[in-house]
Image: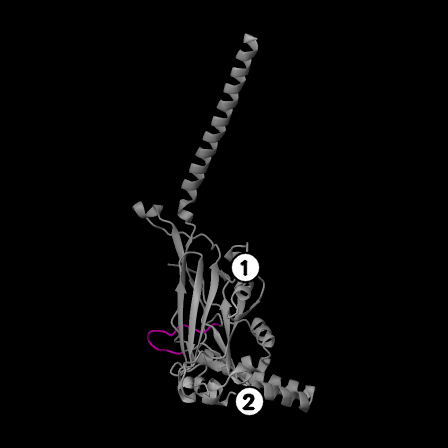
Amino acid sequence: MPLFCAAAALDAGLGHAAAARFGAPPAALRAAAPWNSAAVRLTRELDGAGFHRTLSLRVDAAGAVPAAAAAAAGPAACRLVLLQPLPSGLFADPYQLEDLRRTSPAAPRFELLGPLDLELPAPACQPTLLAVDLGPPQQQHGSAGAAAAAAGWEAEVPLHAKYAQPVSAGLGGWRWALSGSADIVVPAPWLLFHCPGGVGGLEAVASTRPAARGSSGSPAVEASNGEREEGDQLQEATNDQGQQQDLQEQQQEQGPERGHQEQGQQRDWLALQPPSNVPQLLWRVPVGNLDHAAAVAVATTAVSLACAGAIVWAALGSMRAGSKGGKAL
């Protein structure tokens, strides 16, 4: 099936805006590394069918969350913010999220960023970003170490698909009458950890290798032959060095006090981007079949002419009945 909406990269402007909503410094996102698949496990499912479904996510830290933080309560506990990129073919309804938050106190905090028009079709829309504050990890009762090992975060996010651009299925025979369909790639979220007092205990969840990126800027799907795009990795490393240099220059211009403050904030935050081996999640939706255009035009014309003829016939009949009634009088 064709992909009418490929995986969307995390827009830098939307990502920094979302991070700022939760108090994270921009440098945390710029320093993001892919998470280590051995330490972090992401489980995603799409519940329901059609254009309105629920995205269920679970993030397991596999013991990487510091035991003291996992056992702590309130502000002392580490919390996780999901940054979920949404391509132009998907959107979250802000009114539905507001109602969910109002009717369910246990619902996470949602922040929707980017231009959103609920009525426009997918080709006329732009990608958006949904930030989900999951709070501290959900734990099982037991010791601090057991709580850290069982730490995990869960979320259920209602999402909706937009009408896609019609496609030409190219089907022959009786299959010509079938409707078309297309797949939307649901991007993997970025993870933004916040641990008061520092995220040093979370170093195990970060991979030492940069993420392989495709031409669109999004994490590329791992090839079957295991080849890596070394040129893209080198370019990404060069960009990271440039961003770090820019950050140092900004800190020098802002003064040592402001720079030390941002460094202290950055130590409390850890941003992780999805690695290249995250399985794809596809959302199949029906789309218009351009092969039906000629048949639909003929049928529409025939029905319109038949309806117009019926109206004219009824009008003539009414006129004849009126003329006969006049003569009878």
The answer to whether 288 is drawn above or below residue 214 in the figure is above
The residue drawn where x is 43% and y is 50% is 288
Magenta-colored stretch includes residue 224: yes
Query: Which tag, 1 or 2, sits closer to the chain's start?
Result: 1
* Element marked by disc 1: loop
- Residue placed most toward the observer, 313 or 65: 65
Q: Nearer the viewer, residue 221 or 83?
A: 83
Is residue 63 visible in the rendered image? The answer is no
- Mark seen at residue 24: none
Which residue type carries mark 1? Answer: Cys
Which percent across, then down, holds residue 49? 40, 58
- Give percent across and percent down for residue 57: 43, 71
Residue at position x 58%, y 75% in the image: 16
Q: Give the overall secondary structure of the magenta segment.
A: loop
Q: Is residue 51 above or below residue 153?
A: above
Q: Mark 1 sits on what residue? A: 125
Query: Which residue occupies the foreground of this view, 294 or 201?
Result: 201
Q: Around disc 2, counting alpha carbons within 10 Å, would you say few (fewer than 14), some (14 to 19), or many (20 or more)?
A: some
Image location (x, y in percent) of residue 297? 45, 40
Give the residue furthest to the top.
328
Q: Quadrant of residue 182?
A: bottom left
Task: Please give the range of residues in magenta.
Answer: 218-228
Above or below, 321 against 259 in this view is above
Q: Which of the image's four quarters has the C terminus? A: top right
Q: Amino acid at mark 2?
A: Gly
Residue identifier under label 2: 197
Quadrant of the frame with the N terminus? bottom left
